[in-house]
């Protein structure tokens, strides 16, 4: 038996997987985000720990026999967050999250201090990444920065609580802007740009390697016979890739979660910073990946649902079963800024093309299409940087909507595959990494492809209409950019 533990922004999910890769039990505990100032996004790491304790206690309640047989635990989780610890290992301030945009100026400063950062770290400095956050803390909270002795990413901090070890895997470390992504080691130059040294960083390992054991008292508390091995684990998207079996070059998937990711696995490092494409290490050895990222994917529909005061399924039910033409309205999904291709934390979204005839259904459809067009930007960025993406699996909560997947297939002009278990995500991949850490099995033996339930091909008429509409969508960015910050 193996546990996959996924530390998300909205909750902690824990699952038990048996030797046949069947999910035996699952528990989810909710989390909330604090936004003390506009553009800020923080969480108290102690809330992660309480949610983790509750989730694992719930698994023991639901499946005590399975918990007693657990041999390994894998971690996946939200990337880029900055957990600052003092010399005693105590948390100094709330974690600054991946979708926090306060460190815009510090991105410029980081690249000024380390001009080779884009080639070494393989990414543009963006406010969501960890390194600019530390420059911000040094500038605005100097007493906290002076007391900082260790910097951990969210799931590495959770490992620290579980095992007492400070260890991080390559995929998650890639999102810090402190990793030499090609060499898979910390970069002294990148750390120096933030007035840090490698002594402040956790040790590095591959995602399928052993990285500590659960403390004996915790193992007893959760009904485990032995102290399970804790695998190196993965960043959330890399964990999802392992869960899908996307470990070979060319394997691609689209994650329609809170944020949106278009992923493709590569057998070498490919840098695509000109289009805001991310290049990270994979969670399995000797592999890398590229990602195009949109900040507000399913989050855009969730926002529209809150504005309307209507649940998302009811909003979607107002749309025709088969979308025949684009909405007359256009939605720009820049609610939290945008990464690919604009690298613009300050841009803000909106509706355009509204008229007296615009109704709620037209605006809901425009939200779905706006997110699809942002994925088209990501796809074109990946292709421009050398990746060949011709089809993709679809995962995440948004994949439950057949309408949205059809819109995406037409906007991207490529087949998309819906999966039978498209929402297991990072927790299932984490369990697979736990198994490999315990057994030493090869990734290709354990990471079997996900079972597909349906292939959605592009609708020719809608595809052609969207090809024209995406030109309008892209032309609106400069105008919205000029208005952002002024309204």
Image (spheres, helix red, strand yellow):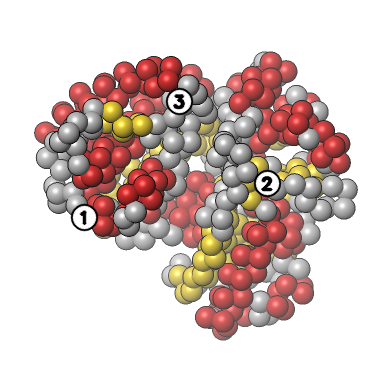
Q: Is 328 situated left or right of 106 in this image?
A: left
Decide which of 438, 264 is in the foreground and name it: 264
- x and y percent of residue 411 in the render? 25, 34
Residue 75: image tag: none
Q: Residue beneath label 1, please?
A: 317
Say which label, 1 or 3, has the lower sequence index: 1
Find the residue positioned furthest to the bottom.
65
Which class describes the residues within 10 Å of circle 1: few (<14), some (14-19), or many (20+)? few
Q: In x, y percent, where is residue 121? A: 63, 27
Distance from the alpha carbon under mark 1 to that under mark 2? 38 Å
Residue at the spot x=73%, y=72% of the render?
Answer: 218
The answer to whether residue 308 is visible is yes
Could you tell me how far apart the alpha carbons at marks 3 and 2 are, in whole angstroms? 29 Å
Q: Residue 443 placed where, x, y %?
A: 52, 53
Residue 354 picture location, percent across and down: 23, 31
Left or right: residue 319 versus residue 451 is: left
The label number, if any, that marks residue 95 in the structure image: 2
Q: Nearer the viewer, residue 395 or 185?
A: 395
């Amino acid at each position: 038996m193996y546990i996959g533990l996924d530390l998300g922004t909205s909750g902690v999910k824990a699952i038990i997987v048996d030797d046949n890769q069947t999910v035996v039990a699952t528990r989810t505990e909710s989390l909330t985000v604090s936004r003390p100032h506009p553009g800020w996004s923080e969480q108290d790491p102690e809330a992660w720990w309480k949610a983790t304790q509750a989730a694992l206690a719930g698994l023991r309640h639901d499946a005590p026999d399975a918990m007693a047989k657990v041999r390994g635990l894998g971690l996946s989780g939200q990337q880029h967050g900055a957990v600052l610890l003092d010399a005693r290992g105590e948390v100094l301030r709330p974690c600054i999250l991946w979708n926090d945009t306060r460190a815009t100026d510090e991105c410029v400063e980081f690249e000024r201090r380390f001009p080779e950062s884009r080639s070494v770290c393989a990414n543009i400095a963006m406010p969501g990444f960890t390194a600019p956050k530390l420059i911000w803390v040094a500038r605005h909270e100097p007493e906290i920065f002076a007391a900082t002795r260790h910097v951990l990413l969210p799931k590495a901090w959770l490992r620290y609580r579980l095992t007492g070890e400070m260890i991080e895997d390559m995929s998650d470390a890639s999102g810090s802007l402190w990793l030499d992504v090609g060499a898979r080691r910390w970069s002294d130059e990148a750390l120096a740009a933030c007035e840090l040294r490698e002594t402040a960083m956790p040790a590095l390992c591959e995602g399928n390697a052993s990285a500590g054991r659960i403390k004996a008292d915790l193992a007893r508390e959760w009904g485990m016979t032995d102290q399970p091995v804790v695998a190196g684990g993965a960043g959330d998207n890399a964990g999802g890739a392992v869960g899908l079996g996307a470990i070979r070059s060319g394997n691609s998937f689209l994650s329609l979660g809170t944020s949106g990711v278009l992923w493709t696995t590569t057998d070498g490092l490919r840098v695509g910073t000109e289009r805001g494409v991310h290049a990270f290490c994979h969670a399995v050895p000797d592999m890398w990946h590229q990602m195009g990222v949109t900040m507000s994917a399913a989050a855009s529909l969730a926002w529209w649902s809150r504005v309307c005061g209507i649940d998302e399924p009811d909003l979607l039910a107002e749309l025709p079963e088969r979308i025949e033409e684009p909405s007359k309205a256009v939605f720009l999904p820049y609610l939290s800024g945008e990464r690919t291709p604009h690298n613009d934390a300050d841009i803000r979204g909106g509706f355009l093309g509204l008229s007296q005839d615009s109704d709620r259904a037209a605006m809901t459809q425009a939200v779905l299409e706006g997110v699809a067009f942002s994925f088209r930007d990501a796809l074109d960025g990946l292709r421009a940087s050398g990746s060949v993406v011709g089809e993709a699996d679809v995962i995440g909560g948004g994949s439950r909507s057949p309408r949205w997947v059809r819109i995406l297939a037409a906007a991207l002009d490529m087949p998309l595959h819906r999966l039978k278990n498209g929402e297991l995500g990072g927790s299932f991949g984490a369990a697979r990494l736990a198994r490999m850490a315990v057994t030493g099995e090869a990734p290709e033996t354990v990471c079997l492809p996900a079972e597909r339930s349906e292939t959605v091909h592009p609708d020719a008429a809608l595809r052609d209409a969207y090809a024209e509409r995406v030109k309008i969508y892209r032309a609106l960015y400069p105008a919205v950019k000029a208005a952002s910050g002024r309204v």
